[in-house]
Image (tube, grey):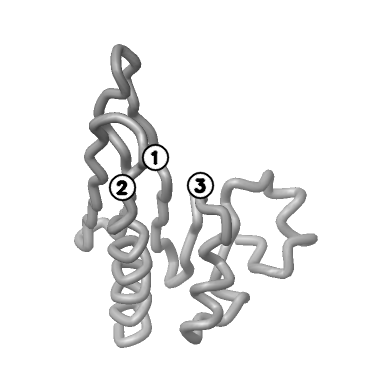
Amino acid sequence: MEKLEKYRNYIEQIIKEYGLYKPSYGEVEVQTIFDRERDHYQLFNVGWDGNERIRGCVLQIDIKNEKIWIQHDGTEIGIAGELVDLGVPSSNIILAFHAPYKRKYTGFAVS
């Protein structure tokens, strides 16, 4: 359980940091969504840029079977490296946005 609590804290820390950056256009609200009970975490943008609706996921991360599943990463840097820098072994990070057959080439866990 200690490992899972660390992972939850790391994920929330990263999402909170990215959540500080508001898009430079439009009236966009940046939402941090943390569901610790089911281990789902998101950073989401929602709002308007003039007459255009803005709605989209920036980050989506789950914890399943004691591994971090990065479902979507819309950052420039890539949060997998940030998690490794915090001490999460790459063998416990799954780049779920890659097809399962490609994951063996990523340097991270396959599943």
Given contact means CB atoms under 8 Å apart, are the residues at marks 2 and 3 in contact? Answer: no
**Residue type for callout 2:** Lys
Which label was assigned to residue 22? Answer: 2
Question: Residue 15 location, x and y as percent?
Answer: 34, 61
**Residue type for callout 3:** Gly
**Residue type for callout 1:** Cys
Placement of 52 over or under 19, stated as above or below? above
Q: Quadrant of residue 23?
A: top left
Q: Which residue is mark 1?
A: 57
Q: Quadrant of residue 64?
A: bottom left
Circle 1 sits in a helix, a strand or a loop, which is it? strand
Q: How many numbered marks, from 0 up?
A: 3
Q: Residue at x 42, y 45 (%)?
A: 58
Q: Quadrant of the C terminus?
A: bottom right
Horizontal relation, residue 66 to residue 20: left or right: right
Question: Residue 1 location, x and y as percent?
Answer: 30, 83
Q: Which residue is mark 3?
A: 74
Comes first in the chain, label 3 or label 1: 1
Placement of 4 over or under 106, stated as above or below? below
Given contact means CB atoms under 8 Å apart, are the residues at marks 3 and 1 in contact? Answer: yes
